[in-house]
Image (cartoon, rainbow, N blue to C red):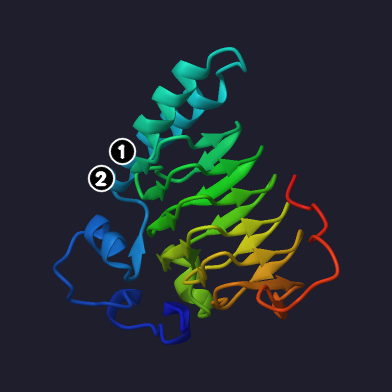
């Protein structure tokens, strides 16, 4: 999948979309180039970080409060889903997670664009779901321009500890991504992928001599 930085060029006043009448917040929501020094964007980020701070301050015995705060923070949370603090987000409202999911300690979900997580997904500790991207042009980077591309993690996926998922990636249903892998391109359903960049090493439909080694936690 191509990302916005591949085609960004400097135009009038350094704006990649010179003459565009949309607000910066609307550009961000549309997945186009924007600058984050915008009052609407700043307010949304502050609200998300405040809710994340409150969620992260809960104790193991405050399950009801923790679940309440998680549902206020994220765009949607399915039944039976558990996320262990700390959780780090840009806004939180652009994250949707399905039912019966488990996310271990230290999930970073930078949700400038939508992050969609299906049902029955397992996420190991310190996984990073990173939607933001930046221009290759250093002048545009210095001027503060950025964009984002959505991430989709389909039903039944298992992300091992320390996995990094890059902007614009979709990980197919039931796929397993080994610990420490960096996913830069879409992965098909029902495969095992490992490495940096992650590559498919086998199909889950192939016969195997034994279970996949536990790496997610």
What element does badge 1 sit on?
A: helix
Find disc 1 in the rendering and name its residue: 43
Position in image of residue 116 (x %, y %):
41, 56
Q: Position of residue 70 (x, y in %)?
A: 43, 31
Question: Does 114 sit left or right of 104 as displayed?
Answer: left
Q: Disc 1 and disc 2: Cα gap in Å? A: 5 Å
From this viewpoint, which residue is outermost toward the left?
21
- Residue appearing at x 34%, y 70% in the figure: 33
Give me the residue at 75% from left, 73% from top.
196
Q: Name the disc covering residue 40, or none.
A: 2
Marks 1,2: beta carbons within 8 A: yes
Q: Is 102 displayed left or right of 3 in the figure?
A: right
Question: Along the line of sight, which residue is nearer the eye, 161 or 100?
Answer: 100
Quadrant of res 83: top right
Q: Residue 48's image quarter?
A: top left
Residue at 38 percent of width and 58 percent of height: 114
- Name the side, left or right, on which 94 lies relative to 170: left
Q: Position of residue 169 (x, y in %)?
A: 51, 71
Q: Identify the secondary structure beneath mark 2.
A: helix
Q: Image quadrant for the C terminus?
A: top right
Name the residue furthest top: 61
187 over 103 or under it: above or below: below
Q: Looking at the image, which residue is at 65% across and 57% down?
A: 159
């Amino acid at each position: 999948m191509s990302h916005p930085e591949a085609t960004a060029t400097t135009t009038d006043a350094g704006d990649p979309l010179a003459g565009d009448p949309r607000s910066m917040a609307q550009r961000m929501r549309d997945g186009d180039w924007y600058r984050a020094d915008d009052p609407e964007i700043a307010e949304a980020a502050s609200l998300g970080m405040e809710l994340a701070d409150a969620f992260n301050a809960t104790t193991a015995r405050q399950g009801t409060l923790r679940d309440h705060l998680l549902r206020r923070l994220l765009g949607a949370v399915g039944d039976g889903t558990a996320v262990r603090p700390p959780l780090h987000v840009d806004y939180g409202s652009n994250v949707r997670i399905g039912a019966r999911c488990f996310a271990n300690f230290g999930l970073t979900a930078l949700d400038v664009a939508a992050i969609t997580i299906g049902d029955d997904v397992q996420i190991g500790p310190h996984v990073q779901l990173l939607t933001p991207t930046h221009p290759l042009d250093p002048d545009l980077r210095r001027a503060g321009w950025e964009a984002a591309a959505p991430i989709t993690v389909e039903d039944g996926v298992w992300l091992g500890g320390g996995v990094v998922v890059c902007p614009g990636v979709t990980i197919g249903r039931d796929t397993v991504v080994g610990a420490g892998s960096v996913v830069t391109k879409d992965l098909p359903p029902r495969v095992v992928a490992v490495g940096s960049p992650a590559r498919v090493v086998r199909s889950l439909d192939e016969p195997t001599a034994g279970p996949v080694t536990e790496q997610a936690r």
